[in-house]
Image: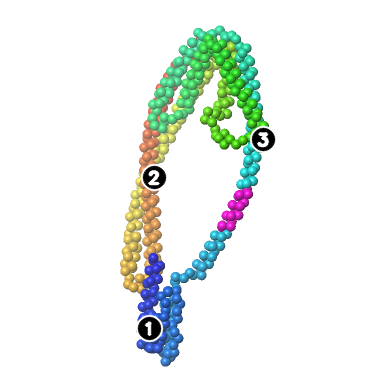
């Protein structure tokens, strides 16, 4: 739209200049004026039309010079009417663009052709490799099933030979169970106390991990002792149940071995293969390899337990009691060590927080001074900006052709742009400084809260938990004596 307005203005100026020249020539030389008017009347409205005035024969040499001047001025004025045509540079640039686009399309087509060949070869290779890998894994699976089936069969035979149970050590086991309640109370009390930590200090640290391990260890010890008591009474029934479970597992694995062996013999030339699209979907009730192995491993573990309980329970009971007592005391020592280490960490963190709090307060003061300085600089830049803008405003009111983009105008525009960029940079820096100050204030408050939290955590770990753990029972009591 701006280009069209400029072309229209140029045409109007051109017509005015031609009229003035025509009147001047008419006064000096009527014949030239008549020729110029005829040429102007024949000129088309197309601004790209390149017309020349008619040749005339002036009467005198002065009239000829003036006519030549008029013709030259008319040609210069008409040159502005040809601005809508393409320039040679634009023509060359368009040709180059077309050539570049054509070359890019050819390169893209060549690349796609090469990629298609590569994809075909890769697909064929991947298909063969995938089938070979599946066949190999079927063979490995057959070996694994055969090994597990043989192991199950061996355990079935061992469990079938067990007939009698051990004499119960019920009294000693009950004492050990009663003694394990005290460590459980101490551990749960420590965990409850440490739940009172505040804010970020309520962390799942090494102490909590060790306390949870201690609780789990106590629970496992109690379960082991209770399981030993139960085995004394129900060992025969347990052996029969384990034997039944092992036989069912052995039967399932035998059937699975027969099916996988049939699948392993399939090939691309087999005549009894068919399409089964739905078979590729996983069944919801299907187990994964880990659960499959875990199931068989659980059956074997139960078989081992039953065998050991049937043959060696009297010999193992003493060792179980002794080892559980040692494990509990070892875990108690680990908890005490973790508590001491945690107290040292909290104390060091508190010292570091206090140091950072002091440094943060100093940085807050420095940042406030920087903000005041930036605000003052912004105020100082307002006067030069007003001067430059005022100069531009007054110079914009210059009349007619005096409204020229001269060196002062260019300099003033550059000065205003530079001042505006400077002010924008200063404002952005001031905004970042203010955000930094806000962050520093938030950091200071966070540091103050963290210091209070660290003090509270030291009270819990250093006094409440450590003092309560001095009532932990001895290893002899935990062994049932």
* Res 329 seen here: no
The residue carrying mark 2 is: 436
Please, is residue 406 above or below residue 182 in the view? below
Asked which secondary structure carries label 2, the reply is helix
Q: Which of marks 1 and 2 is in front?
A: 1
Please, is residue 87 above or below residue 271 in the view? below
Q: Which of marks 2 and 3 is in front?
A: 3
* Res 124 seen here: yes
Where is residue 417 drawn, in percent x and y? 39, 60
Where is residue 4 drawn, in percent x and y? 39, 68
Where is residue 261 drawn, in percent x and y? 65, 28
Residue 107 belongs to the span the image colors magenta: yes
Mark earlier in primary sequence (2, 3): 3
Where is residue 465 drawn, in percent x and y? 42, 22
Instruction: Determine which of the numbered discs, if any, sits on residue 162 in the image.
Output: none
Which of these two is toward me, 292 or 374?
Answer: 292
Q: Which residue is drawn at 49% across and 70% down?
A: 87
Asked which secondary structure carries label 3, the reply is loop
Q: How crowded is mark 1: few (under 14 residues within 10 Å), some or many (20 or more)?
A: many
Please, is residue 385 above or below residue 361 in the view? below
Q: Residues within 10 Å of mark 2 (few under 14, many from 20)?
A: some
The region drawn magenta spans: 104-118
Q: Which residue is drawn at 56% across and 29% down?
A: 288
1 and 2 marks in contact (CB < 8 Å): no
Q: Distance between the residues labelled 3 and 1?
A: 103 Å
Which of these two is toward me, 193 or 282?
Answer: 282
Residue 158 belongs to the span the image colors magenta: no
The residue carrying mark 3 is: 270
3 and 1 marks in contact (CB < 8 Å): no
Q: Which of marks 3 and 1 is in front?
A: 3
Mark earlier in primary sequence (1, 2): 1
The residue carrying mark 1 is: 22
């Amino acid at each position: 739209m701006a280009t069209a307005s400029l072309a229209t203005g140029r045409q109007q100026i051109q017509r005015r200049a031609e009229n003035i020249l025509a009147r001047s020539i008419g006064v000096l030389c009527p014949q030239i004026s008549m020729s110029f008017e005829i040429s102007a009347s024949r000129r088309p409205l197309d601004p790209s039309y390149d017309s020349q005035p008619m040749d005339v024969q002036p009467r005198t040499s002065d009239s000829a010079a003036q006519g030549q001047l008029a013709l030259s001025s008319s040609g210069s004025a008409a040159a502005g009417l040809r601005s809508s045509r393409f320039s040679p540079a634009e023509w060359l640039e368009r040709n180059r663009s077309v050539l570049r686009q054509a070359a890019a399309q050819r390169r893209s087509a060549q690349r796609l052709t090469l990629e298609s060949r590569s994809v075909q070869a890769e697909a064929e290779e991947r298909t063969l490799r995938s089938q070979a890998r599946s066949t190999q894994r079927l063979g490995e699976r057959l070996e694994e099933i055969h090994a597990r089936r043989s192991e199950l069969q061996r355990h079935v035979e061992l469990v079938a030979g067990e007939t009698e149970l051990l004499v119960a050590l019920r009294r000693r086991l009950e004492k050990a169970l009663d003694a394990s309640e005290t460590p459980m109370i101490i551990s749960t009390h420590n965990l409850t106390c440490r739940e009172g930590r505040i804010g970020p200090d309520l962390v799942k640290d090494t102490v909590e991990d060790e306390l949870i391990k201690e609780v789990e260890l106590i629970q496992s010890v109690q379960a082991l002792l209770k399981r030993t008591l139960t085995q004394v009474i129900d060992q025969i029934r347990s052996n029969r149940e384990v034997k039944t479970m092992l036989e069912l597992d052995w039967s399932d694995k035998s059937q699975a071995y027969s099916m996988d062996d049939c699948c392993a013999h399939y090939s691309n030339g087999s005549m009894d293969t068919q399409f089964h699209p739905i078979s590729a979907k996983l069944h919801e009730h299907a187990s994964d390899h880990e659960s499959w192995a875990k199931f068989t491993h659980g059956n074997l573990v139960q078989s081992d337990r039953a065998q050991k309980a049937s043959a060696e329970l009297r010999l193992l009971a003493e060792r179980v009691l002794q080892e559980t007592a040692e494990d509990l005391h070892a875990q108690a020592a680990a908890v005490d060590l973790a508590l001491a280490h945690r107290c040292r960490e909290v104390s060091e963190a508190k010292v570091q927080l206090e140091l950072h709090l002091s440094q943060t307060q100093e940085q807050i003061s420095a940042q406030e001074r920087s903000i005041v300085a930036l605000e003052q600089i912004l105020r100082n830049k307002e006067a030069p900006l007003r001067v430059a803008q005022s100069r531009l405003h007054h110079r914009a009111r210059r009349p007619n052709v005096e409204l020229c983009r001269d060196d002062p105008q260019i300099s003033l525009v550059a000065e205003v742009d530079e001042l505006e960029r400077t002010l924008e940079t200063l404002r952005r820096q001031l905004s970042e400084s203010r955000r930094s100050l806000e962050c520093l204030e938030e950091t200071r408050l966070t540091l103050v809260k963290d210091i209070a939290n660290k003090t509270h955590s030291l009270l819990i770990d250093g006094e409440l938990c450590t003092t309560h753990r001095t009532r932990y029972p001895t290893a002899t009591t935990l062994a049932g004596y």
